[in-house]
Amino acid sequence: MFFLMLRQSFFRGRRRKALATLTIVLSASLITALMNVSIDVGDKMAREMKSYGANINMVPKSEAIPLEIGGVDYNPLKDRVFINESDLPKIKEIFWHNNIAGFAPFLKTTVEIAGNAKKRINLIGTNFDRQIPIAGDDEFRTGVKVVFPYWQVKGEWPGDEEPAGILAGAALARDLGLKPGDRLTVKGAGDTGREESFVVKGILTTGGAEESALVAPLAVVQRLAGMEGKVQSVSVSALTVPEDKLSRKARQSNDSLDSMEYDRWYCTAYVSSITHQIEEAIPNVTARPIWQVAAGEGAVVNKIQLLMIVVTIAAFIASGLGISSLMATTIMERSREIGLMKALGAADWEVYLLFLSESAFVGVIGGLLGCLAGAGLSQIIGLSIFGSYVSFSPIVVPVNVAVSVLIALSGSLMPSRLITKLYPAEVLHGRR
Amino acid sequence: MAKIVLETKVLTKRYGSVTPLDSIDMQVKGGEWVAIMGPSGSGKTTMLNLLSLLDSPTEGEYILDGVGTATLTEKERVAVRREKIGLVFQQFHLVSYLTALENVMLAQYYHSMVDKGDAMEALERVGLEHRTDHLPSQLSGGEQQRVCIARALINQPAIIMADEPTGNLDEANEEVVLELFKELHREGRTIIMVTHNPELAEFADRVVRLHHGKVVKDA
């Protein structure tokens, strides 16, 4: 009989339940959307944050201290330790290889402008946008265009396989009066230096030291410096999760972690665990997080997630209050029914049970419909903010239904106390 | 000689300075049909609320089937009402989303166990076997009142307490309901009925007249 009453109350009193269900649907859809976005926001934001550049810098383990005067490196390359270019694909073979968004190798040498022996400048070799042979990923293209998306070129980017193409830093171009299309001959530093002729394809603005240098394809600079197959450093852009207590502990020393902590740390995409795995994959290199970027990413993602939680709690409270007021109205509307039940011998708890069960049912239906609506809403949020779809997490469904039932019950709890205050004699006869 | 099933001694109800029911002494024997009459505000409904244990007196004593009700807890009062009293209301008070049959079964549910066959029989008895699956909104006033009577009878109570049972009915339906009460009386049930209708009161064994909360005539 109880379930019959519940069913009939719900289906024959559809209009009455529709408003309560709608309230739950609205809040559940908001909560679903926020949860979906919250779960995915780390990844989305990490990708967004990649526009701030690399977050890991890789150098040889025994890199000599550079001797730079006026931004020009006077330390001869022949005395220095290098990374083998052939080792670089190993970066994409670590445990968190899918989180490696890109990397850009660098080899810097000093050259003279032909006909102006006193003008020494840096020539930086790198990959602009080059396909790297990676096992299982034929399409992996990387270079400074991927790692430093904020680099701007007036003119056009040279091709990696184009030996004569070069970028001139904006400050240098101003200094030498260079513009796209100009020809330029440079000579390797020292008496035996080779000469190379280039065409300036574009003027580069980075906001960094590259603006006072020439940037050429890596192979060209390797040949000019006589360092075929060698690079000095690699900037790596990795998708990471924000730092927490465990990663901070690991930062002090890996040895301080017990085996379970170590496994958890290793299997979480912290910037420190990714650098550790790079060092494991490529011997004799040191991979260091660029903390300004890594910590900044973590702080922003944490704050966005906190904001999401606050908005979710606000939605929870708002819909709870909505349900509470609807429930109070319903109890007043159905006071005669409650009075009759009591007159027929129902105990207060039996009436409570009926009303709270109705609320829980409204919560389940509202929660499920809210999941559907929220899934759509999260895609709208994803497309409008991140320009891509937000992945739907199945865990959201049971969590959201449970939260919806909780909202419906907590919203009903206070008003349902009115049930005990209703006397059959008052409500059935309209007076005492 | 019939046993006294209901007895009040100086039964009084006060709300602040207002006393709608003042020192009522009354006895009702088993199988007796008592009509309570009086003008509006005379205390008829207050008296019925006290007798049906829907309300508690301010003073006095009420003994129902040999049991003093003054010391009963709310739970015990509910249990006594459930076992001994069938209620019929002027406004019918049927649950709007339950069919006629389900409304009768509701009283079974809060009493003991639901039995669809018994509920069907109760509706047959009031001549509604063809309207069992109809919602209250699909029934006429007379039919709704008959459902209300079937619900009052389903748990076989010894006492029927009715508040203006024909107050909202037309003449034809009034006649049908009156016949049902006559039949219940013949079966030996005790009936306490509040009414304004002198024709209905004619069939009662006794008429208790109230005025300003006091019994002015009991004959």
Image (tube, coloured by chain):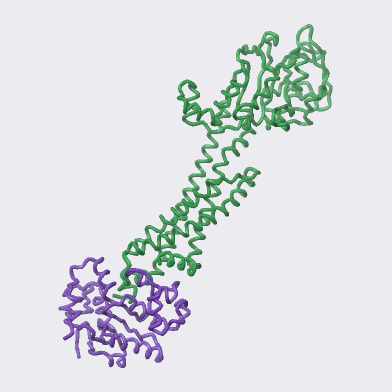
Tell me the quadrant of the picture where the C terminus of chain B can be found: bottom left
The one nearer the camera, A286 or A166, is A286
Identity of the residue furthest to the front in this view: B117
x then y, percent, for residue A319: 47, 55
The answer to which of A306 and A229 lies nearer the viewer is A229
A75 left or right of A168? left
Position of residue A406 measured from the top left corner of the image (x, y, whole percent) = 43, 53
Give the total number of marks visible in the rendering.
0
Q: Which chain is green?
A: A
Identified at 65% across, 27% down, the residue is: A92
Position in image of residue A277 (x %, y %): 58, 24
- What residue is rendered at 70% in x and 31% in y? A137
Name the quarter where the N terminus of chain B is drawn: bottom left
User: For residue A78, which quarter of the picture?
Assistant: top right
Above or below, A332 relative to B27: above
In this picture, is A178 found above or below A350?
above
Of residues A349 and B91, the one nearer the viewer is A349
Tell me the shade of chain B.
purple
Within the image, what quadrant is residue A430 found in?
bottom left
Residue B38 position within the rendered picture, expressed as x and y whole percent measured from the top left: 26, 87
**A287 lies left or right of B146:** right
The answer to whether A268 is drawn above or below residue A197 in the figure is below
Identify the residue at image location x=47%, y=53%: A404
Tell me the residue at 42%/56% (across/down).
Answer: A409
